Each structure stands twice: as C-alpha cells, then as structure tokens.
Image (cartoon, helix red, strand yellow):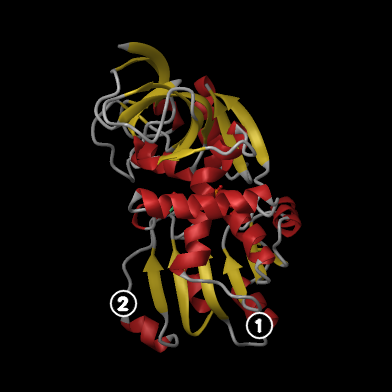
Amino acid sequence: MTKVYAVRVHKPGGPEQLRYEPVELGEPGRGEVRVRHTVIGLNFTDIHFRTGRYPLSSLPHVIGMEAAGVIEAVGDSVTAFRVGDRVAYAAETPRAYAQATVMPVTRLIKLPDFIDDEAAAATLLKGLTAQYLIRSAYTIKQGETILVQAAAGGVGLIICQWARHLGVRVIGTASTPEKAALARANGCDHPIIYTREDVVARVRELTGGRGLPVVYDGVGGSTYETSLQCLKRRGLAVFYGSAGGVIPPFDLWRLNRMGSLYVTYAGLADYVYDHAEMDARAAELFSMMKSGVVKVPIHKRYPLADAAQAHADLESRRTSGASLLIP
Ligand SMILES: NC(=O)c1ccc[n+]([C@@H]2O[C@H](COP(=O)([O-])OP(=O)(O)OC[C@H]3O[C@@H](n4cnc5c(N)ncnc54)[C@H](OP(=O)(O)O)[C@@H]3O)[C@@H](O)[C@H]2O)c1
C-alpha cells in the first residue's frame, strides 16, 4: 500500500464537496501501472463528475481525467511500459486528482521528449477531443467555414488553432471581448461576442446567407438552438459537451424543417476505442504540438489542494485555455 494525497467527492454538489485528504493506493495488478503525477489537467468534465451529472461508480471517489507523470511501479504482463517512463493519459474513469494513481495501461501514452509534462497535462484530453471532432466526427476541409461555440475554452481554442492550420475559416463565440481577442489570436477569424451580438444573424452575414456545413458545440443547453440555426441545408451539428446545461429532448421532425440537418452527440471514448486508435490520434496531436500549430495557453496553475477554487473559476467562466493542478 502507498499513501498519497488526493481530492475526492464525498457527495455530489458544489466545489465545497471536494476534499483534499490521504488515500491508500494498492499495488498495480495485471496490466496496470502506478503513475506518480507531476501535473494534472483541469477539465469541465471534472465538474460534471462532481455535480453528479456524470455518475461516479462509488463514493467517496477521486475525480479528474487527465494527468502527466512518471511510471513508478509496473504490474504483471505489462510489456509496453517500464518504470521511469514519462507518460500522460486521458482516462476512461476519474482518477487524476491525486499525487499518484494505479491504472490500466489501455489509456496511457508515452511522452516524446519534445512535450513537457505541463503541455501534456494541458493538452492531451482537450487535444484528442479536438482531433477527433475535426478529423473524424466531421472532417473539416480547406476553404470551409465552421462555427466553434466557446471558442476561447479548452477544446475550443485547439479547434481554432488546428482549423486555421488546415485553411479553414473559423467563426467562434465567446462571452467577453478578452475571450474574443484570445480566440482571434489563436486562429478564430471572426470572434462573435454572443452577449452583445446576434450569433445567427452574424453567421448568415459572414456566409452570404448560406449557413455552415458544421458547428462544434460543447456548451449544449444554452447554445444548441443557435447552433442548429447556423447550419446550411444538410449541415451537421456536432455536440460534445454541456458546459451551458443539458440539451432537452426535441422533435426530430424539426431537423427536416430546418433543412434536413444532421446531428451527433460525440464522446472521446468512442473515438479512442482501442490503443491503436488512441496512439494514432495522439501521434497526430503530438506532431501538431511539435510544429507549434497546437499550443495551449496556461490560464493558471493551482495547488491540487485548491481544486475547489479551480472548479469555481472554471464554472464561473473566469478561465480560458487550460488550467493545471499541481500535486
Ligand atoms: N465529448 C467529449 O469527448 C468531450 C471531451 C472533452 C470535453 N467535453 C465537454 O466539452 C465541454 C467543454 O469542455 P472544456 O474543458 O473545453 O471547457 P471550457 O470550454 O474550457 O469551459 C467551458 C466554456 O463554456 C462556456 N460556457 C457557456 N455557458 C456556460 C455556463 N453556463 N457555465 C460555464 N461555462 C459556460 C464558457 O465560455 P464563454 O465564457 O466564452 O461562454 C466557458 O469558458 C464540457 O461540457 C466537457 O465536459 C466533452
């Protein structure tokens, strides 16, 4: 047994439900390793696990989906990883808000020398998400125009950077002039401050009235209607999150009336369903990081013990890009 400090949820609720406390870690079993974390990534998904929107298998439970670190123990039948390897992960189940974790190797990625631990923890989960959204859920193409909701957010900024690199014109939404400026600096050609401007009208104006082939929407409840209205005939709405609330059930017949639209609600787990697929997506992401196309600005570093403050900041939209927890 190894004792580490971790942040656990004891019952679903607000940031005050996060407790920094000692927990016991077992030894790694078959196919598992123990990873000593150096940096932990903060994600909006962590808030969904804290509030109970996403269920935890038991309580109390450590939350957090993303971290970088070093392997310090290896279980039976693990051949691809060794003690001392620098690794990062976008986990299947919550575990990252801790000084160390014991986990299966299925979601583990070896880090190349050119990616430091902070860049890995800030980028892996959000970057794999951006990768599958723009390369698989809908493959964006040079010359197209797309809309990214919450363009200054964690996933949003990476989509802007990568899309610009591919010769795609990006329209993005943000709540404040500061976030709009950050989105612009990261590849968003036309930031729309949605608190002041009519997003649908502006998108129609920017597309000569036609609308868009695709919209990426991780905000959900407060934006899905706008996203649908920005599409052109037979356009696709790619929903992938609910930072702004849950999308209510709606009548599919509306998709017909709005121009035979398509809709998907995508999840990372279905796009990295085996190690080969995850390695391929991570390799493409890392090559974008190496060439400087994808570079996530670090908004703030918090001590792991201050995870509750980090959640409060992310929830109240005070953040942009990525924030990190330091164990
Ligand atoms: N399906 C997947 O594979 C996948 C993977 C990663 C993340 N996600 C999901 O994608 C969403 C975005 O994740 P992220 O980590 O990139 O977050 P984020 O964009 O860094 O933060 C959320 C942003 O959403 C906007 N927002 C709009 N309404 C909001 C509200 N009521 N409360 C808080 N924020 C609101 C804010 O931007 P403005 O201030 O500009 O409005 C805020 O900065 C989350 O729901 C997350 O769970 C899904």
Residue for badge 2:
251
User: What residue lies at 58% left-to-right and 82% top-to-bottom?
Assistant: 211
Residue 14 position, x and y percent, is 42, 34
Residue 76 position, x and y percent, is 26, 26
In the rendered image, which quarter is residue 310 located in? top right
Residue for badge 1:
207
Which of the two discs, 2 and 1, sits closer to the camera?
A: 1
Q: Nearer the viewer, residue 146 or 83?
A: 83
User: What residue lies at 67% left-to-right and 76% top-to-bottom?
Assistant: 202
Amino acid beneath label 1 = Thr
User: What residue lies at 38% left-to-right and 69% top-to-bottom?
Assistant: 264
Q: Between marks 2 and 1, how big is the CA–CA gap?
A: 27 Å
**Is any part of residue 194 visible from this angle?**
no
Q: Nearer the viewer, residue 84 or 209?
A: 84
User: Label 2 neighbourhood size at 10 Å, few (<14), some (14-19), many (20+)?
Assistant: few
State the quadrant of the N terminus: top left
Regarding mark 2 in the picture, which secondary structure is present there? loop
User: What residue lies at 45% left-to-right and 60% top-to-bottom?
Assistant: 220
In the rendered image, which quarter is residue 186 located in? bottom right
